[in-house]
Amino acid sequence: ARKSGQPWNVYDAEQEQVFVRHHLLFGKLREALIKQHLRVHYQPQIDLRTGRVLGAEALTRWMDPDSGMIPPSVFIPVAEESGLIRQLTNWLVDECMRDCAAWRRQGLDLHVSINLSALNLLDPALMGVLQAGLAKTGLHAQYVNLEITESCFMASPERAMEVIGRMHDCGFKLSIDDFGTGYSSLSYMKNLPIDELKIDQSFVRNLLNNQGDQAIVSSTIELAHNLQLLVVAEGIENTATADWLCSRGCDIGQGYSFARPEPADALVAMAIRRGTG
Ligand code: C2E
Ligand code: CA
Ligand code: CA
Ligand code: CA
């Protein structure tokens, strides 16, 4: 038997726990996908100058009948490691496109932003899924924003560039999510057909009390605008932060100050109240 208290032993036990937990979650997640226990919530994206709703980011929610709400920070990594991210994203794309098509039929000028994993970009079937989604729902690609992170350039830069080029050719909009937190090469920004840059919430949360964050955020806004990109700030939790960002020229805001991610009904109500486009 192993003696406890030895570092390698502790490490081993932790690894085993992680493994068992992931394995259990994998089974549950596969079941959740089949039984449709996943839901899409939408967080509004607001035009900081006009206050209108421009669209929404889709964020997946998993309500497990036994253990309650399981956060994406827990199940997305499990989905990525197990390969289930493929099924999850296929499901997500269909849901989001159907919802967005319905909003637009109601006369609401809204787009939808969909998070893609780095692994999704390596999946040769992804383009087919995206195009089938458009065909099924009648939605135009220009109303779909695909959010990718800098990490997708790390795994396989050539492949990522190629897929992004094809997405752009199909008419999809491309956003770089969590900008500034990942692989820090700016070369992809000038070489890729990107439309939008999302400033990570870690720079936004304490913005008003942190001069370093202020310097990074203003410079990022300027850089993005010089490259003709739109800028989204996420994690805006109060109006003072929204006002500061607007005064620095940030285009779009997202955060609890405006709304939390909620079911589509809540987004539609807000869009009607504030106006769209
Ligand atoms: P993300 O794409 O950076 O999404 C923003 C996260 O910030 C969301 O957390 C959102 O609920 C949260 N958030 C929004 N406004 C505020 C705010 O004002 N304050 C604070 N403290 N948080 C705010 P969530 O929904 O827990 O998702 C976490 C991450 O999980 C996402 O980060 C994304 O990377 C991933 N994720 C979520 N849904 C999906 C999905 O359907 N597919 C993929 N591939 N990833 C997803
Ligand atoms: Ca995102
Ligand atoms: Ca983000
Ligand atoms: Ca994130």
Image (cartoon, grey):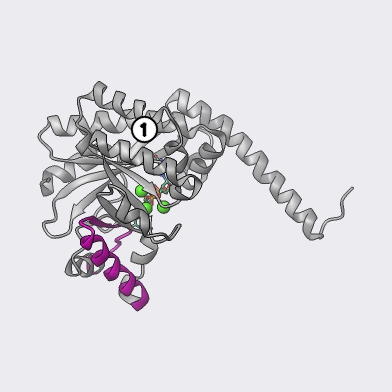
Residue situated in front as seen by the camera: 65 or 170: 170
Task: Give residue 178's quadrant in the image.
Answer: bottom left
Residue 266 located within the stretch drawn in magenta: no
Query: Residue 238: horizontal and vertical position, in percent?
Result: 27, 64
**What segment is highlighted magenta in the picture?**
211-240
Residue for badge 1: 92
Farthest residue to the right: give it. Answer: 1
Query: Residue 181: horizontal and vertical position, in percent?
Result: 43, 60
Q: Is residue 242 above or below residue 211?
A: above
Query: Residue 239: horizontal and vertical position, in percent?
Result: 22, 65
Q: Is residue 37 left or right of residue 142?
A: right
For ligand 1, tell me if the residue under mark 1 lies within 8 Å.
yes
| Residue sitting at x 20%, y 29% | 139
Q: Is residue 219 left or right of residue 185?
A: left
Residue situated in front as seen by the camera: 272 or 198: 198
Q: Is disc 1 placed on a helix, strand or loop?
A: helix
| Residue sitting at x 32%, y 52% | 191
